[in-house]
Amino acid sequence: MTFKIEKNTLIKYEGEDEEVILPEEVDIIADSAFYNARKLKIVHMNDHIKEIGSYAFYNCESLEEADLPDSVYYMGSAIFSRCVSLRKVKMPARLSAVPKITFYQCGKLEEVILPAALARLNRACFEQCHSLQRIQLPGWLKVLEPNVFDDCTALQEIHLPSMLKEIGDNVFFNCESLKYVNIPASVEKIGKGAFETRSRLSIEAEGKQLIKAEMLDNNWNMNWNFGVNHRWNGKNEENYKLYHSYLPNVDLKMWKPQAQCVLGVNYLETYRNSIINYDSWIIEHKTELLDKIVSDHRWDALNCALDHDLIQTEDTEAYLDLITDREERAKLLDRRNTRSIDDLFDLL
């Protein structure tokens, strides 16, 4: 093993070993110390390492696992960027933030253990981690900077903690496997494209944060259905992928007509109490709403609208022939027959 060490600082590793044990005198790993050490698979650090500089293990393409000692209190940026074989990392307990682009393009990264006191995930720290399916965020986390999980295409599960304050631009951009995201009541700021997953997504917003179209699409069009060469296919009616989402605080006038229909359907599917903004829109746009409900087979929304008299049974008569679901069709016919009997009694 060939080390260049100056005053307890590892300046450069110059060997070609697959397994490396750091000398006991090393307290600091300098910037780019293992930069481009392509054969390195395992590195053993002593329990008194204090600092790891930027790009320390950049492009160590064979590195498979890193267990960073809890003595580390400072880490630079891009430490493990492009470590394409890296699968598991345990971060130091004293760390308050994961630096920017720490795991950028770590395509095989599957598990990251974050410290309990972590308050911030910095810009693009997990961008293009294509094998990361789930990650547990600590309860103290307050800030997700832009692009944190950008293009994490395998990410399936995530729970945003109750102390979170800020969600930056494009945090979940192209997270096509992510099906559900909660927005805690604590959130005060959401950036453009934060939830532009380009896939069917359920969002539950708990607080007063105004949900804007730009949060789901940088272009305000919600054009998630991209065709050849990742270009918009022009069929706008196919591009609205929100599903069973609870978004109580929206200004419907800020959204395009088709998006208003989507929001109306989602409101009905997750109905908790009457929201005048939604109720008024539904009453004024019954035809558009029913077109969307029937074409997408969103029967929970239909039954909710009928239960709360936002639409009437007679409003659905023109759609009976289009409802092929036997159970739902039977429910509608039963409602119509019940209403006819009630009308008869009213005349007596």
Image: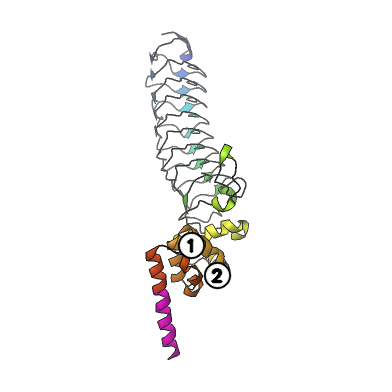
Residue 344 placed where, x, y %? 42, 86
Q: Residues within 10 Å of mark 1 (few under 14, many from 20)?
A: some
The relative height of residue 227 versus residue 331 in the rendered view (above or below) is above
**Magenta segment main secondary structure:** helix
Q: Quadrant of residue 39?
A: top left
Residue 215 placed where, x, y %? 56, 48
Tell me the residue that label 1 is attached to.
294
Tell me the residue that label 2 is attached to.
283
Mark closest to the chain's N terminus, 1 or 2? 2
Q: How far apart are marks 1 and 2 (CA)?
A: 17 Å
SS class, disc 1: helix
- In the rendering, which numbered label is found on residue 146? none
Residue shown at 37%/22% (left/top)?
Answer: 47
Residue shown at 57%/39% (left/top)?
Answer: 228
Query: In this picture, which residue range is highlighted in magenta?
Result: 334-348
SS class, disc 2: helix
Magenta residue check for 227:
no
The relative height of residue 71 versus residue 307 in the rendered view (above or below) is above
Left-right relation of 188 to 67 = right
Residue type at mark 1 is Val
